[in-house]
Amino acid sequence: MVETSSGGGSGPHASEIDDVLSAVAKEARAYLESLDERPVRSSDLETALESFAGRLPEEGSGAVDTLEKLTSRGMDAAIHSSGPRFFHFVIGGVTPAALGAEWLGSVIDQNPGLWIASPLGGRLEVLSIAWLLDLFELPPEWGGVLTTGATMANYVSLACARHWCGQRQGIDVEQQGLRALRPIKVLSSGYIHASATKAVGMLGLGRASILKVARDDAGRVDLEGVERHLASFDGDPAIVIANAGEVNAGDFDPINEMADLAQSYGAWLHVDGAFGLFARISPDTIDLCKGVERAHSVTADGHKWLNVAYDSGFAFVSDPALLRESFGVSAAYLTPGGENQPDFGFMGPEMSRKARGLAVWATLNAYGRSGYRTMVERHLALARRVARRVEEADDLELLADVKLNIICFRLHPPGLSEEQLDVLNARVGDAVLADGRVFVGTTSYRGKVAFRPAIVNWRTTEADVDLLVDTLRALGERLRTSG
Ligand SMILES: *Cc1c(COP(=O)(O)O)cnc(C)c1O
């Protein structure tokens, strides 16, 4: 039975659901089957995008018609960043288990802000955090929350740091405000991520309180400089941010040495491991993260290397009580959960919040430690393959050692000046995005325009990374010969 749902001012109707589910499942199947072959960017993107316009309709067209419109035009307007050849930024795909759980999550639409509102969401968030701590070999007594991403995980972590620094000054910063606090300095290397800077700003600590103590133009930390700063604070607590995986070349700060300094001078140590924390999963790369278990807080992303859909991130803290001390509130109508029934709305910035634990739990349950280890090691091998091809080619130049899953390199045909190389690489950077077969971004690394593909998608194969290298070389060749 299909009733009409349009016209007559009719609102949502249960009779639409069956058609909506069938239509979406059919489209989803076709889309996902074609994802490995699709260009990242459809040549029809602009026109498809323009079809979404016009005024708010007085009478809606109903769910079935609307979803037909969304699937027929929306798929071309979308960037296929969950496919295997999206190497720009650090954007993961979606595993089948995560996809299924995510879908089911919107069917049951849970809000684990309060345990009582979604025991299922709460329970799976508790379990997700415990399993992630295990996966990353962090102490089981730590706590955490699931967030929208690493930016908010940095925010949560640094809010706990701010609270902890306040306690050391005898101040309750949430109650008394920043004006009661002596300024808190934040020390990091040149590798600090823009999102940590943003979080420091949002917390009112002042972006200018961040000191980037680097010893070279790549941004590598100057440990002696960090120590000199810490010694100069006269015992006032500071925050040290160590970076596990920076975005230009995938390099790591020496976390263990920074942990020594934080310990000696009584500073908070935060580690931003948005994607780099996954180095912990493989014996090949585990040493890059040595000392992360000594941190007070750690950030990682779900929507990057875990391959869970947007938006998903994790904040871990060594002292779980700090989450409630920083974010807890009460109101007459809010009923707190009991023992082992955490209300995640009192442990992070949002009260009402999505049940992110469903997808995180599902993908970890489906593939386990060994499934993730295999995937990470496959990606490490792909990154090394790209590096090898770059080193073998006479028109390419590797700009940094490959530590993890990012390869920093540039086109470097013989006979061009530095200035001409920058122009060429920037033009190829524009051309590759317009071409659409592979997506990769440029950066400025040690003053040079460079490519920095990141490999994090479970679908990516050798053929995909080979196409990346071949496409960049071919576009470079074409741009040079056409002048
Ligand atoms: C991506 C990234 C972030 C920000 O994460 P979002 O998930 O985009 O909020 C923070 N730090 C590092 C090192 C990153 O790579």
Image (cartoon, rainbow, N blue to C red):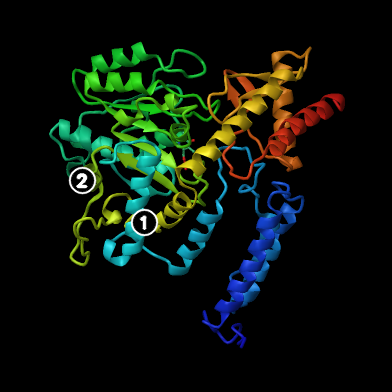
- Say left or right for 179 vs 444: left
Visible in this render: residue 458? yes
Residue beneath disc 1: 124
- Residue 456 to residue 256: above or below: below
Residue beneath disc 2: 325
Amino acid type of the residue that numbered disc 2 sits on in the rendered structure: Glu
> In the depicted view, which residue is nearer to us: 24 or 285?
285
Q: Where's residue 118, x and y in %?
A: 33, 64
Disc sitting over residue 60 in the figure: none
Occupied quadrant, residue 481: top right
> In the depicted view, which residue is nearer to us: 464 or 421?
464
Helix, strand or loop at label 1? It is helix
| Residue drawn at x 15%, y 36% as measured from the top left | 171
Q: In which quarter of the image is the N terminus?
A: bottom right
Q: Where's residue 437, x and y in %?
A: 74, 42
Circle 2: is it few (<14), some (14-19), or many (20+) Cα within 10 Å?
some
State the residue lying farthest toward the left.
170
Visible in this render: residue 60? no
Q: Where's residue 277, x and y in %?
A: 43, 34
> In the depicted view, which residue is nearer to us: 146 or 156?
146
Amino acid type of the residue that numbered disc 1 sits on in the rendered structure: Leu
Q: Does the residue labelled 2 lie within 8 Å of ligand 1?
A: no
Q: Distance between the residues labelled 2 and 1?
A: 23 Å
Q: Where's residue 218, x and y in %?
A: 52, 18
| Residue drawn at x 53%, y 36% as measured from the top left | 376
Circle 1: is it few (<14), some (14-19), or many (20+) Cα within 10 Å?
many
- Residue 26 to residue 374: above or below: below
